[in-house]
Amino acid sequence: MALRIGVDTGGTFTDICLYDTERNELRVFKVSSTPDDPGRAIIDGVSELLRIADAGGYADISYFAHGTTVGTNALLTETGARTGLLTTRGFRDLLELARGRRPRLYDLQADKPAPLVPRDLRLEVTERVRHDGTVRTPLDEDEVRAQIRRLRDEGVEAVAVCLLYSYVLPDHERHLARWIEEEFPGAYVSLSSEVLPEFREYERLSTVVANAYLGPKVSGYLARLRERLGEKGLAARPYVTQSNGGVVSFAEAEKYPVRMVLSGPSTGVVGAARLASAAGHPDIITFDMGGTSTDVSLVQRGAPRASSGLDLDGRAIRTAMLDIHTVGAGGGSVARLDSGGLLKVGPQSAGAFPGPACYGHGDLPTVTDANVVLQVLNPEYFLGGRMKIDPEASRRAVGTLAAELGMSIEDTAQGIIRVVTANMARAIRVISVQRGHDPRDYVMVPFGGAGPLHASRLAAELGMTTILVPESPGALSALGLLLTDVRSDFSRTAVMPLGTGAADPSAGDVAAVLGGADPSAGDVAAVFAELDAQAERWFEASDIEERARGTRRQLDLRYAGQNHELTVAFPAGPVTAESVAAALDDFAAAHERAYGYANPGNPVQAVTFRVQAWGEIDARPSSSPVIGGRPEGEQPRSREVYLPELGGFHECLVYDRAALAPGTAVEGPAIIEQMDTTTLVLPGSTARVDAHRNLVIGAS
């Protein structure tokens, strides 16, 4: 078996990447997504690509990885399973009480999201474990079994279990899981001590409820897809992407679906980081614009930034993930007038169906339609000529909006582009300026079907001077699936004093750091040993060879009295006074960067311990993708494109990306077309093809 397949399912298109390891040949392909049944587009697209590439059949596939938005969409649209909750007596309303802070401070009418578990399905059980793990009130088995039967009779499909101090002593939750299996066989059960063994009861409760809510839908989807792939002849173990940028087996993903909320965009960031680093650009801002949304992330020194969670539609999700910010701005984003008569774009999207008006199924003006009107997008050549579009439908849709605004169709279309550019610029400022990073110090890496189309204007808005467009940007998330590793994260909260921090960290005075003794190294070692053992069991269960295994330790630290932590790396090897001191030094430096000061001599607490484990994949693609050009091979052509920088329509040269050899320079204004995207080069800019076949766009 010599074929490796990566499939990324988006709201509008499904991208497929095939790597033939024997031929060292890489191919990309796109098909329209099938939102009613995402697996149908996957099977149809993979089958068609295998046929086009003459690469064999499903039995020849040695690696299959998939990125999906099924879980994310189920949360956003509230279409998950009917879920019940068992929690410690007195805490059934915590899911609605949440945190006291308000995301919109001055909006007195702001509504909270509806809880994923209604109050009548949130049941309490008598038990109490103290913060130190001692049992104050034991479980009442008869009461628990009665509550389980009540949930069963209410017709729930999934049961979330979250007891107050389960992260310290998980035994009570394990008892509940066993009794649920006996009283309610077939229910999807999710334990907070397994999903998120960390403190902060609201975040743990919200996360385990989301996991249970998604469980039946995600596990059902993955099971059906696995069955279809098996019927086609796939013998290899299929993988799915997690939010942390790694992949895991379908079986593990079915147990922890909440770890997939950023399944779609995470591998695009991983792929962009690897490709840009290879081209000599380790500090980048990724810009992934698809049909429905835009995802942005900041990468430093070739490593994507990590995060411990996010709030998705007002609900706390805490799990290891890449630091990605999402806005509802994509090619299918709908333009409209708000109640004040102002032009708005998104977050509503036309999706894959009915799609933009030019697709022929709807009549709503979208960002794609605006680009068709401006003739930035080729009205005849789309997806390598496989998809016909209707430019007159775009003009009619944008024309309706233009009539309401009292503007020309072209000016209205350009207005749509300006608004969506401003929306995306705000998203990039969130992950850069608001966190102390100047976007002008970074290279923009656009991908997704619409990324290169909008990158030049977005970079100009932010003052960024260099853009790197990968050779196959429209399918980079699918390609990233072939570049990422198998990965899993393990964590546990164990609050303990770690030391005080040296008055002069550079002095390396271990005795000063630890107050003249070593009270904490043994406790730190014990917790990391527990997590290392979990990682070892995961390696064995995942059949990862010894030579391919790797782990990384991290520690969440804070000054005593603080309510929030900073995550720092913890040195590999045996835990010693010196490694503890190094972690304290790193914490002081991180605190200085984040808040502008550090407090040498103040007591420091260790809070949450983390171990990330990964298995390196073999046979990463080393060839350039076969993306296909126009059959007639014309090079270059021309067409009139609306460019406000030049006062209106202007004759632009149009190049076929596949025909541009390394070293080629394209002066703007110009259009560069390929099967999976279109790149706009503005006046005053030059696009040069580097040795890796990337387009590098900068000032002329």
Image (cartoon, rainbow, N blue to C red):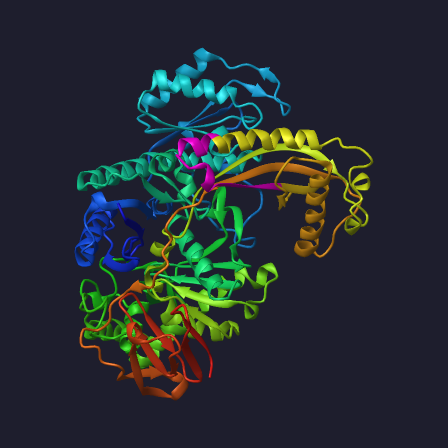
Task: Please give the name of the residue rendered at 55% of the width and 28% of the height, measured from the top-left corner.
Answer: 167
User: Observer-nearest residue: 548 or 675?
Assistant: 548
Tell me if residue 630 comes above or below residue 56 in the rendering: below
Q: Is residue 235 visible?
A: yes
Q: How many marks?
A: 0
Q: Is residue 567 visible?
A: no
Task: Please give the name of the residue rendered at 29% of the width and 72% of the height, measured from the top-left corner.
Answer: 658
Residue 619, given in percent of the width and then of the height, sits at: 37, 50
Tell me if residue 683 comes above or below residue 689 in the rendering: below
Quarter location, residue 687: bottom left
Is 355 placed left or right of 164 in the picture?
left
Look at the image and say whether residue 539 sits in the magenta stretch. yes
Residue 639, given in percent of the width and then of the height, sits at: 26, 84
Tell me if residue 505 comes above or below residue 386 in the rendering: above
Residue 255, given in percent of the width and then of the height, sits at: 38, 33
Q: Which residues are magenta?
A: 537-555
Quarter location, residue 344: bottom left
User: Observer-nearest residue: 626 or 458?
Assistant: 626
Tell me if residue 10 comes above or below residue 464 in the rendering: above
User: Observer-nearest residue: 230 or 179?
Assistant: 230
Is 342 placed left or right of 38 in the picture?
right
